[in-house]
Each structure stands twice: as C-alpha cells, then as structure tokens.
Amino acid sequence: MNEARRIAESANLAKSMFLANMSHELRTPLTAVLGYADLLLDQSIAEGERASHAAAIKRAGEHLLRIINQVLDLSKIDAGQLLVDDAVAALPRILRDAERIALPLAREKGIEFDIRLAKPIPSHVRTDAVRLSQILINLVANAIKFTDEGSVTVVADCAGPGDRLIIDIEDTGVGIEPLQVQQLFTPFTQIDMSVTRRHGGTGLGLSISRKLAQLLGGDVRLLRSRPGDGSTFRIELPLRRAAQAVDISSLDESPPETNLSQNPRLMLRCNILLAEDSPENQRFLTTVLRKAGAQVTLAANGREALELIAAAESAETPFDLLITDIQMPILDGFNLARELRGRGMNLPIIALTAHAMEEDRQRCFEAGCNDYASKPISRATLLDTCIRWLPKPAPSATDSVAIL
C-alpha cells in the first residue's frame, strides 16, 4: 500500500513539474511571437529588420506547434488512438528531410552534422513515413541540443537477423550519467529540471519517439553514453522492402522529389471554392492560392458554399476543388461534404481544420472528404495537398521559354 502511494505521489510530482515546465516552454516562444509582432507594427523599422522579425515569428510559431503536437501525440498513444500507416516510404527522402532541418540547427551551434550509409540501403520501404521522420528528427534535434562542440552523425544501416533497418544517431555532447539513464524514456520528466538548466524542452521527445517506434514494430534505445563523451541512440525497425526498391549506397543516387510548392514555374490553373469562417484564415489561404495562380471564391459557411456550387454548376463554370473548414456556422464541413455526396457530386473536397485528432480525420473521410489537413498549415503543404487532387498543369508558353 505504501509502495503504491509512493508511486502515485511520484507520478503526480512528475506531472506537476511537467506542467510548470510546459508553462515556461509555451511562454518563451509566445513572448517572441507577441514581441516581434509588436515591433512589426512600428512603421519606422527598416525592411531588413522587418524580414528578420517575421522570420523570428515563424520560428517561434513552429516551435509552439511542435510542443502542442508532442502533447497531443502522447495523449493519443496512451489512449490507443494513434494509428500508423503501412505504405511505401522513400527512405532517402526521410533522411534528406532530417538533414534539411538539422543543418541550420547545427550551423547555429558551430558543430558538424553528417548523414552516411554504412552499407547500401533500399530506396523504398513499407512503413509510416511521417512517423519514422518524426522519430528521426526528434532524436537528431535532441542530439544537437545537447552537443555544444564536435559533431552529430546519423548512420543508416541494414542488418540481420531478420532484416532490420538500423539508424544510429551519434553525438559528442554532454553524455548521460548512469543513474539518469532509467529516466530517459519516462514522459513528463527531464534529466535536469532546475531553473539553471542550459537545455530547455518538454521532456516528451524521447518518450514519444520510443512509443512511435514500438507502434511501427521496432524500438528506440540508448546504445551507449558516457558523461562528457557523448551518446548514441539507435532506431531499429523491421525492414520491409517495397516492390520498387533499389539498393543505394549514397543519398546522391536518389534524385530529390519535386512538388508544386518548390517549383515556381508550376501554377494552380484552377477554380477553387474556399469555405472558411475566419477572416484571418480566409486572408492567408486566398493569398497563397491566388499567388499560385488559382481563382478563389470565398464562402463563410457550408450553406453559402452549397449555393455557390449550385450557381457555378448552372453557369457551366464548376469549381475544380473545394477546401472546407469543419467548424463553421449554419452548416459545418461534415454536413457540407455529406450534402454534396448525397447529390452525387464528385467534386474533390479537402478538409482543412483545427480538429487534429485521429477521430476527426476519420470523420472527415466518412463524411465524403477526399483529403484532410490540420491547421496550422504551411504554404508548401497547402499547395502540395491541392495539386494531389487537380489535373497536372501543362506548361504555358512562357514557362517553356523560361525552362529553355
């Protein structure tokens, strides 16, 4: 009985410390967002400063989103509600994405970052690409955070028995004391919870990474660590080659994948209906879509969207795509999609919503939506999601001249 009470008290203390730390972690980037936004309102600042302030707001906002996603992921995992995909994943792309995120972080600290292949690896495997990428980026970011001198190296390998994908993340950082190792993968805890600690964070990254790896049939573990001499963490997953896989011995052998958002010559030559009740979101989304070449019509709710769709059909100028919020007045996005499908319309529907749980995603598909994206959404993700549901645009004459 005393042991059970001790365990419960320890868990409650850990959660209390986590909430106090979380308050700090949220307020820090919020201070940057509000502070730099205030500076941007000063009309006298130079254009260069304005761009720098905007970039700082973007970084702080992305950091806030990572914190929110970590908490949601842990909640979904513990509730058994986080589902993983079993699809073809381009392994070189996952490694390149980690490199793209890690290099600026490493340069900022003056340390080296490198990715290498211990032996040829398959170009394509069957796994959840998003979750594998999340695990790798979590571990790489963690290694960089705790490395002030030297390097962080990612080594990808294939090994038996049973064909396993192995990714080691090696750093020359502070290392971990033996007594602290048992706390590494415990949620709501950090190795250093003092107010004088040098490295911030929620204390959830390693715990989430291990749980995600286990959902993928593998594990994340500490391979070695010594105080003052760095650490090596290992991601180990079942290696299931996709049908189109070829072995590559270098990331350079795999051509980078292109998409609309990365190619300024490609345009969204289409007619899009946007159903969204937030004026701020309307302004952002229409700006991005129109700059990409789309014609955008706005609806403030689902009922208005239905009327606009009917009018466009009658005029024989139908919409090519519907992007809809879910929570809207008068008629929500779920019922808008159901109504359109009930009328036999096959207009592609993208649900764009702040409801980010797995059950929300499933409800969107059950209502008849073709795709789903959660808010906040980046320009690149918005354009790439749209292009999936539109005919490939043919290059214009000016595009052809530019390419030549």
Image (cartoon, grey):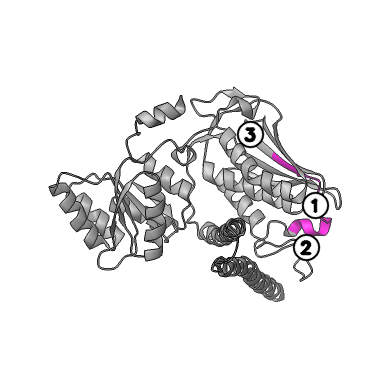
Q: Is residue 179 magenta?
A: yes
Compare marks 3 and 2 and give the one earlier in the sequence. 3
Q: Is residue 118 magenta?
A: no
Residue 383 position, x and y percent, is 42, 45
Q: Start and end of the magenta stretch?
A: 168-182
**What distance separates the C-alpha of mark 3 from that of mark 2?**
36 Å
User: Mark 3 packing: few (<14 Cα in 10 Å), some, or many (20+)?
Assistant: some
Task: From this view, report whether residue 71 is shown above or below residue 385.
Answer: below
Q: Nearer the viewer, mark 1 or mark 3?
A: 1
Quadrant of the rendered image containing residue 236 = top right
Residue 361 shows in the view: no
Q: Which residue is mark 1?
A: 148
| Callout 2 amino acid | Arg
- The residue that disc 2 covers is 198
- The residue shown at (51%, 29%) is 242
What distance separates the C-alpha of mark 1 from that of mark 2?
A: 11 Å
Q: Which residue is mark 3?
A: 164
The residue positioned 38% from the left and 31% from the top of the image is 398
**Residue type, mark 1 in image:** Asp
Q: Is residue 83 above or below residue 280?
A: above
Q: Measured from the top left, where is residue 23 in percent x and y?
A: 62, 72
Secondary structure at badge 3 equals strand
Q: Amino acid at mark 3?
A: Arg
Q: Nearer the viewer, mark 3 or mark 2?
A: 2
Mark 1 or mark 2: which comes first in sequence? 1
Do the numbered discs 3 and 2 sit on residues whose CB atoms are within 8 Å? no
State how far apart marks 1 and 3 are (Cα).
32 Å
